Amino acid sequence: MRATVGDQLVQHGRVVGQHDKVGEIVEVMGEEGNPPYRVRFEDGHEGVCSPGPDTEIRHRETRP
């Protein structure tokens, strides 16, 4: 999984009815675009994430 600053990190809900959590990657802390990432979520919360299998990266250039 590789990302750049400005990409979106989407954590999919793990149970029925749980919404996806979407945030913007504001810092790539690993080498060559690898995790961990500092992410600012829609509610303003910031955190450091090492994405798991329930997460996807939406790159800036490929978003609709």
Image: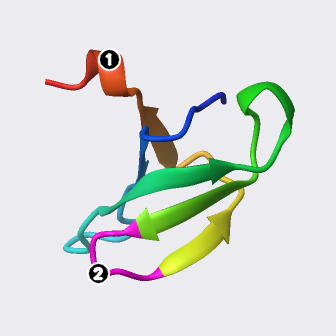
- Residue at the spot 50% in from the left edge and 51% down from the top edge: 25
Which residue sits furthest right?
A: 31
Asked whether, in this view, residue 46 is left or right of residue 17, the answer is right
27 and 9: which is toward the camera: 27
Relative horizontal placement of residue 13, taking residue 33 as reference (left or right): left
Vertical side of 20 occupied by 10: above or below: above
Quarter holding residue 48: bottom right
- Which residue is the site of mark 1? 61
What coloring was used for the rendering?
rainbow
- Name which residue type carries label 2: Asp
Q: Residue 19 lies in magenta, yes or no?
A: no
Placement of 52 over or under 49, stated as above or below: above
Q: Secondary structure at mark 2?
A: loop
Tell me if residue 52 can be seen.
no
Q: Residue 21 has which mark?
A: none
**Element under label 1?**
helix
User: For the point 59% across and 32% down, which residue is it?
Assistant: 3
Q: Nearer the viewer, residue 26 or 2?
A: 26
Q: Residue furthest top?
A: 62
Q: Which residue is the site of mark 2?
A: 43
Q: Range of the magenta residues?
A: 41-45
Residue type beneath disc 1: Glu
x, y (%) of residue 64?
13, 24
